[in-house]
Amino acid sequence: MKLSRQFPMNALRVFEAAARLLSFTKAGEELGLTQTAVSYQIKLLEDTIGEPLFLRRPRQVSLTDAGERLAPKISEAFETISDAIASTRHQSDGTLIIHTTATFASRWLAHHIGTFQLENPQIAVRMETSQETIDFSKTEADVAIRSSKSGQWPGLRSHFMMKSHFTPMLNPKLAESVGGIREPADLLKVRIIDASDPWWVLWFEAAGLPGIDLEGRPTSRFGGIQAFEAAAAIAGHGVAILKPEFYADDVALGRLYQPFDLLASDGSDYWLAYPESRRNAPKIRAFREFMRKMMPTFQD
Amino acid sequence: MKLSRQFPMNALRVFEAAARLLSFTKAGEELGLTQTAVSYQIKLLEDTIGEPLFLRRPRQVSLTDAGERLAPKISEAFETISDAIASTRHQSDGTLIIHTTATFASRWLAHHIGTFQLENPQIAVRMETSQETIDFSKTEADVAIRSSKSGQWPGLRSHFMMKSHFTPMLNPKLAESVGGIREPADLLKVRIIDASDPWWVLWFEAAGLPGIDLEGRPTSRFGGIQAFEAAAAIAGHGVAILKPEFYADDVALGRLYQPFDLLASDGSDYWLAYPESRRNAPKIRAFREFMRKMMPTFQD
DNA sequence: TTCATGGATAAGTTCTCTTGATCCGTACAG
DNA sequence: CTGTACGGATCAAGAGAACTTATCCATGAA
């Protein structure tokens, strides 16, 4: 059975307005309905309650005892409801939930999000990190930052942010200790941090040394989590293959050294994504603008 | 524009159930809808609020922060509403508003309504008297007692209660003072209380004295309000033409004397009427049963 | 692996609700 | 006291919302 049959919610809403204004016509105007519609809805409500709520006097309706009793409570309830909805909307507008990779979070977002906060003091930011691509219908998130080849997901709008290229990096002291790294092959003099990382193969190929076998060489494994590999490299445990954009600071501080300009890529890029349907939510709009400003390669 | 468009009330109702049960399917069962319908309504609500309210996890949905915040307020509002409606229904059920003629009220109802109250202690009775036939859509009333020839009104259900017949009555002492009233013509020896009352002509006709001219005779006028005429007759001011059913008490007490058994009628009868649509309201049903019991001539 | 559970989706159907036209009764102005 | 404006009721017709049926998909359990 239809819900409206059991409990005519809309009729209640109409009643509330009519009781407040003591006029069906005015209530109609307020709600964007015709007088006919109001009359119909009121009758519907009276039928389901089983009590007349209005006395139809010429040129004016007035409430019956029953209507008089009902009206204030209904008004109160509607106030509760609209307050609740408004505050839900408002509060949710006030928190931006960003899902991102751990690396992007620690290497880029952590450094720049302060600017966003400064510019949008009314928006709280919650950052969540995860390796897998999240599903917006299953995870609570407003935007996601992901690396992916196409950056196209059904139902999502996405913006290209930056190329995901990489190059070897190591502690400058470690480089010195092996007499400097002058050509790619010199890298093999030091421990390869996570030789199982597929990026190595790609980079050596780009460097003109295809088919290099890193298997069996001294290595350390970190499960492909770049932030850990970087930390190891900074500590001088070996050479890691990293995204230079993320480690410019460490290079500047002399904690990391990038021996070659050569960058390789696996074709994946960094994308910002969010549900198409929410593209106009203020907080999402604000974050998009922020990214556009902070990241030269950001694209609409 | 449709109201449901601006503010999906029904969707809120569905949301309330879904949030409480944390299941679209169960909510559907509770509301008598399919799971599909629930899914549809929730999506509708999410679209208008602009925030996802549920996380769709396999085999279970859960509330988002926004949903979590919204749910208790909505529940509260609905509780307010249903309480309000229930109490309106209940309280209105608890008061029976009877519109009646002054005469019927004072002469019959006043004597019997106590029994009704005793049998229906939960129903308060409010009596209103008026000479005109009331319009249930313009006047607050549950039932009306009226004298009328046909007893048929559009939209109303009506029950025949009693014939509206009448006969002359006077104070027994007054009758003695003129040597007794033995035949109709003897009535002319005393003052006629409200000779303008058309009932007199009818009664004299029935008594075999048609065309009697009461004009110019001593009289007292009370605007056709029987209760006043009766009071005057009891006080010994003259002879009034009254409904004997209403004055049985006064006859028994010796305050009034009915000289003839002959009753005349103008064709009007007493009817109980109420809106057809409300025939099953408990209080109306109770009053109908009461009348059936107390008034031998009452008809369904 | 298969089954059961719970939700999403698509397409079709029902029927609520809205609209627009018209009528009626009263109040108020002239 | 008459004409006009106001406010509501009623009716028929049509739009579109709400709901259903059928089907699919993903996951957790057996």
Image: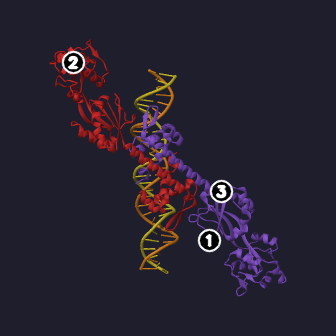
Chain colours: A red, B purple, C orange, D yellow
The quadrant in which residue A28 appears is: bottom left
At label 1, the amino acid type is Glu
Q: Residue at x 81, y 81 (%)?
A: B174
Asked whether the residues under marks 3 and 2 belong to the same chain, the reply is no
Q: Are marks 3 and 1 in contact (CB under 8 Å)?
A: no
Q: Quote the CA–CA distance across marks 3 and 1.
A: 24 Å
At label 3, the amino acid type is Lys
In this orientation, which residue lies closer to the viewer: B188 or A126?
Answer: A126
Q: Residue B45: tell me if it is visible.
A: yes
- Examine the rendered structure and indicate whether residue A98 appears above or below residue D30: below
Q: Residue at x 75, y 70 (%)?
A: B246
Q: Quote the CA–CA distance across marks 3 and 2.
A: 96 Å
Q: Secondary structure at mark 3?
A: helix
Q: Quote the CA–CA distance across marks 2 and 1.
A: 110 Å
Of badges 2 and 1, the one in the foreground is 2
At label 2, the amino acid type is Leu
Report whether A105 appears left or right of A173: right
Q: Any mark on residue B132, and which?
A: 1
Report whether B75 appears left or right of B125: left
Q: Are marks 2 and 1 in contact (CB under 8 Å)?
A: no
Residue B141: x and y in percent read 61, 63
- Examine the rendered structure and indicate whether residue A228 appears above or below residue A62: above
Of badges 3 and 1, the one in the foreground is 3
Residue at the left extreme, as displayed? A182
Q: Secondary structure at mark 2?
A: helix
Q: Any mark on residue B283, and which?
A: 3
Q: Kindly identify which chain the residue marked by label 3 belongs to.
A: B
